[in-house]
Image (cartoon, rainbow, N blue to C red):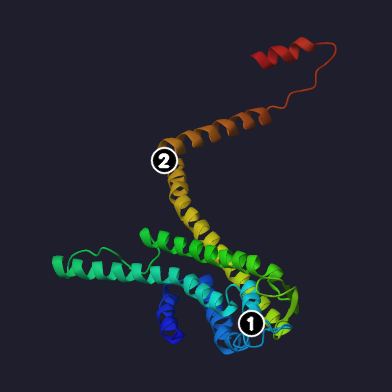
Amino acid sequence: MNWGVFEGLLSGVNKYSTAFGRIWLSLVFIFRVLVYLVTAERVWSDDHKDFDCNTRQPGCTNVCFDQFFPVSHVRLWALQLILVTCPSLLVLMHVAYREAREKKHRQAAGEGSGRLYLDPGKKRGGLWWTYVCSLVCKAGVDAAFLCVFHSFYPKYTLPRVVKCHITPCPNTVDCFISKPSEKNIFTLFMVTTAVVCILLNLVELAYLVGKRCTEGLAPRTARAEGACRCPDCTASSRAGRDLLSGDLLLLGSDPQPPLSPDRPWDHVKKTIL
């Protein structure tokens, strides 16, 4: 497969992505696609040829290899990389659809007419939902493939020796896997990068949702502040402040003498009058 063409298509998504999306795309191509092309294919190129069992029974080695390696690591990773990057192409297709629609609108209504989209690449309306759905799909694909890998290869590791007792093997035979330590290192590396990509997708999703909620609450806050600045509210609040200050001045201007135990009624009459 020509990964260069695929990379060229996805590089156009960079200008429509957030900072987290650009980090995710760089991580995919540097630490996943590049490692897959340079090292992983070579490490797993001899997995069937060097899978050896201590028996000469015809067909036993092939059957045991199929039991312990139902799907090759490199083929699973290739399928995972294709599926995990396809949702990003949906964003690129949505932007292209907006640009084509804007072009048709200008041709039909003229150059001096209004525009359908101020910025076709701005994440608003349907494009925002497309971008959010692409993040959910990418995280879901990576999580699903991690579960598939764990079901085929528990703990994402390969043993050095496996025991096989499937027909046509005459009895339980020992089979030896080629370079298990090296394969375990690359498997754990690919699993770790997939987990980091899932975390980046979730962080970007939280950022977009939080930003959208903040933008939605901003007009309501502005309307509430504008309602408090109306003339009636201002006059009533000013009158309330004047009344309160007058009461405080009245209370503070004439300090009351302490009550006399001999003539308490004088203070009561002065207060009433």
- Does 148 sit above or below residue 42? above
Q: Nearer the viewer, residue 45 or 107?
A: 45
Mark 1 or 2, nearer chain start:
1
- Say what secondary structure mark 2 lies in: loop
**Label 2 neighbour load within 10 Å: few <14, some 14-19, many 20+:** few
Residue type at tag 1: Pro
Residue type at tag 2: Cys
Q: How far apart are marks 1 and 2 (CA)?
A: 93 Å
Q: Where in the figure is residue 12, as x and y percent of width and height?
A: 40, 78
The residue sitting at 77% across, 23% down in the picture is: 257
Residue 204 appears in view = no
Residue 230, label in figure: 2
Q: Where in the figure is residue 39, as x and y percent of width and height?
A: 60, 88
Residue at the extreme right: 261
Residue 61 appears in view = yes
The residue sitting at 54% across, 87% down in the picture is: 37
Question: Can you tell which of label 1 and label 2 is closer to the viewer?
Answer: 1
Quarter the C terminus occupies: top right
Q: Nearer the viewer, residue 145 or 57?
A: 57
State how many labels appear: 2
Q: Which residue bears the numbered disc 1?
A: 58
Q: Where in the figure is residue 194, as x and y percent of width and height?
A: 60, 72
Q: Which of 83 and 244 is in front in this view?
A: 83
- Say what secondary structure mark 1 lies in: loop
Instruction: Locate residue 186: give its quadrant.
Output: bottom right
Instruction: Say left or right for 219 vs 197.
Output: left
Quarter the N terminus occupies: bottom left
**Label 1 neighbour load within 10 Å: few <14, some 14-19, many 20+:** few
For the residues bearing labels 1 and 2, Cβ distance under 8 angstroms: no
